Amino acid sequence: MVSSKKIVAAAAIALTMAFAAGSVNAAPARLSIPNNIMKGAAITSGRSFYSTNVPEDKLAGIKLGRKAQDVLKLWGNPTRISVARTSTSYEANDAVTATPAAGNMTAAMAASFPQLAGKGGLPGLTGALPKAAAPAADSVATVTVTGQEEVTWAYDLRNGITLEFIITDGLVTQITMGGVTPWTFSKTRTGLMLGDTYKLVLYVCGYPENQNYAGKFLRASYVNKSRVLYTFLDKKLVGITIAMVPTDLH
């Protein structure tokens, strides 16, 4: 039996670009789900599903962008707390250009998401890095820029569900829920929830922007379209992650 802690840890978002500004929020359209697509879900009756282009912004009863106090009011003391401060290094020269030194990440990704560099766990989301100061002419220097403080609050619930809230400068910027038990608090705007099947998720949400394996977990990304990443184990939905992107934090 895979623990919900491992499910949450496997739900790291591979963000590659921010959302396009000014998207139109059309009214959601109710979907009719064929019986063969619905078959296999943990809960098959009394459910409604919707097609919508509105990004996911609420999970576990908490909306992205809300104050950290809202999490404490609803869920109380975290089971576990971790603290990190994001930073990245730049090689700068007299041309006032800065190239992020971030291993296998592209420069664009490192500039927007320095916390992804070299990490396999859950990344937090911060705003754009402050500009690095240009060094003196005819010189080359490595400049380390310290970003925002990120705090992760993890809740191991009695029903086997694990919640993780990433708090960046007092605001909820990422929420991950992991577990194998169907739960009302895991429901998304589309009507999907933990315990649903891979085929049902793809039928409702369309084909993913990208898919990849993290160990035995399959991650299907709808980050650009819906701000959500779904994690599967044996073709069952066991993890949901929603997150803000840098453009949301300005």
Image (cartoon, rainbow, N blue to C red):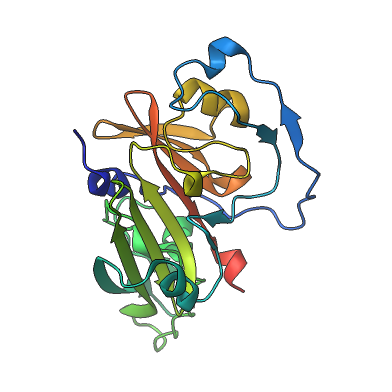
Residue 180's place in the image compared with 93, above or below, is: above
At 44% from the left and 70% from the top, the residue drawn is 71
* Residue 180 screen position, x and y as percent: 33, 36
Q: Who is closer to the viewer here, 185 or 207?
A: 185
Q: Who is closer to the viewer here, 73 or 140?
A: 73
Quarter holding the N terminus is top left
Q: Does residue 10 appear anywhere in the picture?
A: yes
207 left or right, relative to 84: right
* Residue 170 screen position, x and y as percent: 46, 79
* Residue 70 screen position, x and y as percent: 49, 73
Q: Give the residue furthest to the bottom.
A: 136
Q: Who is closer to the viewer here, 246 or 37?
A: 37
Residue 47's place in the image compared with 112, above or below, is: above
Quadrant in the rendering for residue 247: bottom right
Q: Who is closer to the viewer here, 176 or 44?
A: 44
Q: Give the residue furthest to the left.
A: 1
At 43% from the left and 32% from the top, the residue drawn is 211
* Residue 162 screen position, x and y as percent: 31, 52
Q: Does residue 129 appear anywhere in the picture?
A: no
Quarter holding the C terminus is bottom right
In the rendered picture of this protein, how many numbered marks are placed on residues?
0
151 left or right, relative to 184: left
93 left or right, relative to 29: left
At 21% from the left and 42% from the top, the residue drawn is 3
At 45% from the left and 49% from the top, the residue drawn is 241
